[in-house]
Amino acid sequence: MAAATSVVVLDRGNNTTCTINLHGATVVSWRVNNQEQLFVSKQAVFDGKRPIRGGIPFIFPQFGPWNYGPQHGFARIIRWNLEKAPERLASGDVEAVFSLMDNDYTCSLWNHRFRITYRLILREKELHFNIGVYNPSESQPLTFNLLMHTYFKVPDVRRCQITGLYGCTYVDKTRDNTVFREVRDVVGISEFTDRVYHNTPQEHIITNVVSGRKMRIQKYNFPDTVVWNPWIEQAKELPDFGDDEYPNMVCVESGHVSTPLMLHPGTAFEASQILQVM
Ligand code: TA6
């Protein structure tokens, strides 16, 4: 029997909605005037156990392989709380707040207390993310990664260009984790791509997303940007990803992953991201 998974819908009117699955607080849909902006694989699994393949998985406390538990940590594969149900603000925007704290399962993997609040605000053509991580311990520091693993829906990834990476160093996970420096003003995707760019600017633009529009990413306190497309061979390796789906997605991920974050006892860390359809 699959775990009961519930979804929360933010509806701003004008066919502008955002749907969140409490499994991992995964944003599984963001529609702007009825145009879906996010990619979710046709083969995504919603069993309340495995991560959802697509949308915006919440990566915490680990990005990448982890000695203590599943790759990309546990936050995206456990049920979050709906802290504040969707509420329409005076501005007409719709807000909801999700939360996660340590429990027996998380402590069995990673023996640290933590509190996460995750506020989403749906504006006319923007989706705002405000994340707070709090270390309630009086004595132990909290050391973690944090990343929004956003899958953007695109008509053809080969026509997308990503700005804001020029001059940044990146770890190329397709080339034995060798470190390179980006020399291109705009980055295209024409092969298996898996890069962790360090200390990137606050803004990226992705061209040729849905309806040929541009997607603007603004990030605060997320110093790194991950760019990923599995391409042909890797796509075949993913059981919850169609072999023919790689042209229709690109992951451009705001994160703090190249070095771990370290929170002193009793302190909080805040990061935010704004996605805007231009
Ligand atoms: O964000 C890029 C990445 O770290 C890739 O290395 C690839 O593993 C991708 O995440 C998907 O990981 P997942 O565990 O969701 O299959």
Image (cartoon, helix red, strand yellow):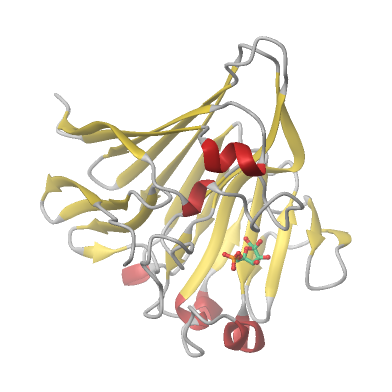
99 vs 205, nearest the viewer:
99
| Residue 150 in sight from this viewpoint | yes
State whether residue 6 is above or below residue 220. below
Q: Position of residue 60 (x, y in %)?
A: 59, 43
The quarter of the rendering in which ligand 1 is drawn is bottom right
| Residue 61 in sight from this viewpoint | no
State whether residue 158 is above or below residue 82. below
191 vs 149, nearest the viewer:
149
- Residue at 37%, 66% (x, y): give it: 47
116 vs 187, nearest the viewer:
116
Q: Position of residue 149 (x, y in %)?
A: 53, 55
263 vs 126, nearest the viewer:
263
The part of the image, by quadrant, that contains residue 108 is: top right
The part of the image, by quadrant, that contains residue 192 is: bottom right
- Residue at 61%, 50% (x, y): give it: 73
- Residue at 52%, 71% (x, y): give it: 160
State whether residue 184 is above or below residue 166. below
Viewport quadrant of the N terminus: bottom left
The part of the image, by quadrant, that contains residue 193 is: bottom right
Residue at the limit of the structure toward the left, as seen here: 13
Q: Is residue 64 left or right of residue 266?
A: right
Q: How many marks?
A: 0
Q: Position of residue 115 (x, y in %)?
A: 50, 26
State whether residue 38 is above or below residue 106. below
Q: Position of residue 49 (x, y in %)?
A: 45, 61
